Amino acid sequence: MINEAEPPLSLQALQAGDRAEFARLVEVYSTPIYRLALKMLAREQDAEDVLQNTFLKALQHIREFEGRSSLSTWLYRIAANEALMLLRRKRPEVSIDEEASEAEESLPLPEQFTDWCCLPEQEFATTEARRQLDQAIQKLPEKLRVVFLLRDIEGLSIKETGEVLNLTETAVKTRLLRARLALREHLAAYFSERLLSET
């Protein structure tokens, strides 16, 4: 995410109101935060609103940031909350805060499994495959989607994902497994066709 050739961001400078340092913060994190918001909300305008609101809130509250988590985790938490607030306004039943229930933890196995080992690697990198994955991600329930995006797309650790979403590591692992199984099931039909076309 951060270019290692560049010096790390200075929390002290940010909290002192250094505009150049805040501009660098925006430059470093704009792309991943926009990407997360777009994949959560599926609308460019909504993602742009989340991006703008994330940095506005970061600017307003940077002096309150105590450094208990990393700066990136803090920014992702703001962005995820902003995106979820937008989702809740549109669909009030949306909630990701509750812990994994017993029903969640008894994971149903997908109805279809496709062995993708024999697909050429380039099949996974095609525009169509990426489109299918994006569509499958959008079909996930919000509480599974946001965990999958933070962990598997943005590369946060289980611990960091839990910190962003205020969930235990167990809840994160449970939801991540359910998201991966659901995605595999959604994508099974597409890759089955690809395998058939290869034979």
Image: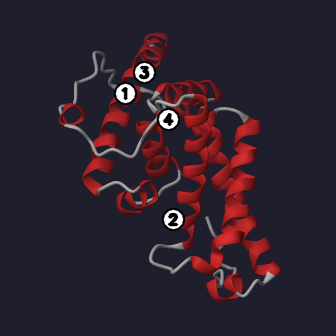
Is label 2 in contact with label 4 (beta carbons under 8 Å)?
no
Three-letter amino acid code at the position of disc 2: Thr
| Residue 35, above or below 57 | above
- Checking the image for residue 186, the label placed there is 3
What secondary structure is found at the residue carrying circle 4? Answer: helix
Identify the residue under disc 4: 121
Determine crowd level at label 1: few under 14, some 14-19, many 20+ residues with C-alpha closer than 10 A.
Answer: many
Give amino acid for label 1: Ala
Dots 1, 3 in contact, CB < 8 A? yes
Label 1 vs 4, first from the N-terminus: 4
Q: Using residue 183 as the reference point, say whether residue 4 is left or right of it.
A: right
* Residue that label 2 marks: 73
Which residue is found at the position 37% from the left and 22% from the top? 185
- In the picture, measured across the screen, residue 30 lies left or right of residue 190, that is right
The foreground one among 67 and 191 is 67
Q: Secondary structure at mark 2?
A: helix
Q: Amino acid at mark 4?
A: Glu
Closer to viewer: mark 2 or mark 4: 2
Disc 2: CA contacts within 10 A as few (<14), some (14-19) or many (>=20): many
In this rendering, which labeled residue sits more in front, label 1 or label 4?
A: 1
Q: Which mark is residue 182?
A: 1
Q: Is residue 42 left or right of residue 168?
A: right
Work out how far the residue at label 2 is from the one at label 1, CA to CA, in angstroms.
26 Å
Of marks 2 and 4, which one's residue comes earlier in the chain?
Answer: 2
Query: Which badge, 2 or 1, comes first in the chain's sequence?
Result: 2
Q: Element under label 1? A: helix
The quadrant where residue 132 appears: top right
Classify mark 4: residues with Cα within 10 Å, few (<14), some (14-19) or many (20+): few
State how far apart marks 4 and 3 are (Cα).
Answer: 19 Å
